[in-house]
Image (spheres, rainbow, N blue to C red):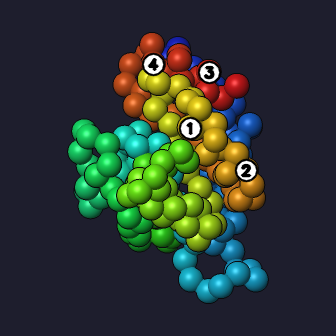
Amino acid sequence: MDGAEDLGLEAALAAARGEFGDFDSALAELTQPGDGEPGLPVLAVVGRPNVGKSTLVNRIIGRREAVVEDVPGVTRDRVTYEAEWNSKRFMVIDTGGWDLKVRGLQAQIAAQAERAVSDADAVVFVVDARVGATDTDEAVVKVLRRSGKPVLLVANKVDDRATEIEATKLWS
């Protein structure tokens, strides 16, 4: 990248921090002693099937432990991993795909995602930037807002400049 692109990225990061806060600061607040139960803070990673939740979890924990496939539905239950970010330890919950209008096994998977949100101190909501926000994403957002938990929106699968530009629409 040249200097102009670096400045564009820095400006975008600064704008995101201004709008949504600084993730490092939010994590530091979660690790402050407080009235909550003792133990490590918990971060739930949720989103529709096949948006890259497990891949993101592997990046957060710094190792390839969560199972990743190119087909939806690989993760079916909540799986918890210990992680560290800037010398702060915390737990990450990887979840299966969350769709609110399902039955049977898929409904049980969705219930596990809701339970992860309930157990979490903060939530990472992953969307596929190539697809944009879907009706399912919007329904999940309503559930997340009602939870009262801090939520970080992650636009995943941004692999080129065109998709990066499209992903900025998710912030508005």
- Quarter of the rendering containing residue 157: top left
Dot label at residue 136: 1
**Amino acid type, callout 2:** Arg
Q: Residue at x 26, y 49 (%)?
A: 68
Give the spatial CA distance, label 2 vs label 4: 27 Å
Looking at the image, which is closer to me, 19 or 36? 36
Q: Nearer the viewer, residue 152 or 9?
A: 152
Residue 162 occupies quadrant:
top left
Above or below for 36 versus 166: below
Q: Residue at x 43, y 49 (%)?
A: 97
Q: What kind of element bears circle 1?
A: helix
Q: Which residue is mark 4?
A: 163
Q: Between disc 2 and disc 4, whose residue precedes?
A: 2
Q: Secondary structure at mark 3?
A: helix
Q: CA distance from mark 3 to mark 4?
A: 10 Å
Q: Is residue 134 left or right of residue 109?
A: right
Residue hosting label 3: 169
Q: What secondary structure is marked by label 4?
A: helix
- State the image quarter where residue 109 is shown: bottom left
